[in-house]
Image (cartoon, rainbow, N blue to C red):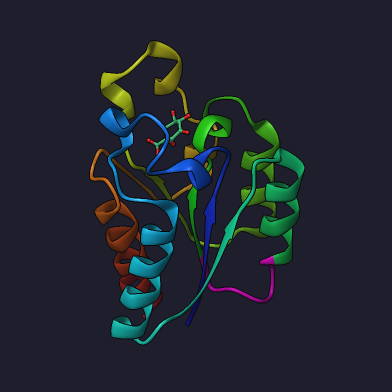
Amino acid sequence: MRILVINGPNLNMLGIREPEVYGKSTFQDLLSLLDRVAAEEDIEIEQYQSNHEGCLVDKIQEAYGKFDGIVINPAAYTHTSVAILDALKAVDLPAVEVHISDVDSREPFRQISYAGLACKKTIKGLGFEGYRQAILFLKNALQ
Ligand code: DQA
C-alpha cells in the first residue's frame, strides 16, 4: 500500500512559525514521525511539501496510478484553491484532509475548505497526531 503525504505552504516553517498555534515541533519532526508510523504499519509513504499551488497540483496528478491514497494538508490553499480540489477529483484517489490547528475555532475564512470537498474525512486540531490518524484511516479503508 502506497500513501502520498502532501503538505502545503509554510508548513516547512513548523517549529518557527506561530508556535502558539502550531506547536514547537519542527517540520523535520513531522517527517520523521510519519516515516516511523509508516514503518510500524508496514505502509510505503512518500512525503512532499511545496509552497506553490501548481506544484501541489502536479504532485496530485502524478499520484494517479502510483499511489493508493493521499493525506493532504493544503495549508492556506485549503481555503482558496479550486485547482487543488479539481486535481483531487481528477485522480479520484481516497484522500484525507489534515489540519494541525482547529481551523473551526479560528478566523471565519479558515472555515471554508475546497480540498475537503474531495476528501473522505477531515481531521483538525489534533496536531501531528492528525496525520497518523489519517494514515491509519486510509490503511483501514484500503484493506
Ligand atoms: C493549517 C490551517 C490553515 O488555515 C493555515 O493556512 C495553515 C495550516 C493547519 O494545519 O492548521 O497554513 O492547514
Quarter of the view holding residue 22: top left
**Image coordinates for residue 37, horizontal then vertical, percent:** 31, 74
Residue 55 in the magenta stretch? The answer is no
Lateral position of residue 118 relative to residue 15, left or right: right
**Image coordinates for residue 122, horizontal then vertical, percent:** 35, 44
42 shown above or below 29: below
Lateral position of residue 77 relative to residue 35, left or right: right
Lateral position of residue 91 relative to residue 101, left or right: right
Q: Which residues are magenta?
A: 63-69
Q: Nearer the viewer, residue 8 or 91?
A: 8
Residue 65 in the magenta stretch? The answer is yes
77 shown above or below 109: below
Quarter of the view holding residue 8: top right
Tell me the quadrant of ligand 1: top left
Magenta stretch prevailing secondary structure: loop
Which residue ends up furthest to the bottom in the rendered image?
A: 42
Q: Nearer the viewer, residue 32 or 7?
A: 32
Task: Look at the image and tell me in which quarter the C terminus lies.
Answer: bottom left
Residue at x 42%, y 43% (from the top left corner): 14
Residue at x 62%, y 40% (from the top left corner): 85
Which residue ends up furthest to the top in the rendered image?
A: 108
Quarter of the view holding residue 36: bottom left
**Image coordinates for residue 124, horizontal then vertical, percent:** 30, 40
23 shown above or below 89: above
Query: Is residue 81 among what the camera can see?
Result: yes
Query: Is residue 102 among what the camera can see?
Result: no
Residue at x 39%, y 21% (from the top left corner): 111
**Image coordinates for residue 93, horizontal then vertical, percent:** 56, 62
Residue at x 37%, y 29% (from the top left corner): 18
Lateral position of residue 97 relative to residue 22, left or right: right
Report the number of numbered marks.
0
Which residue ends up furthest to the front in the rendered image?
A: 16
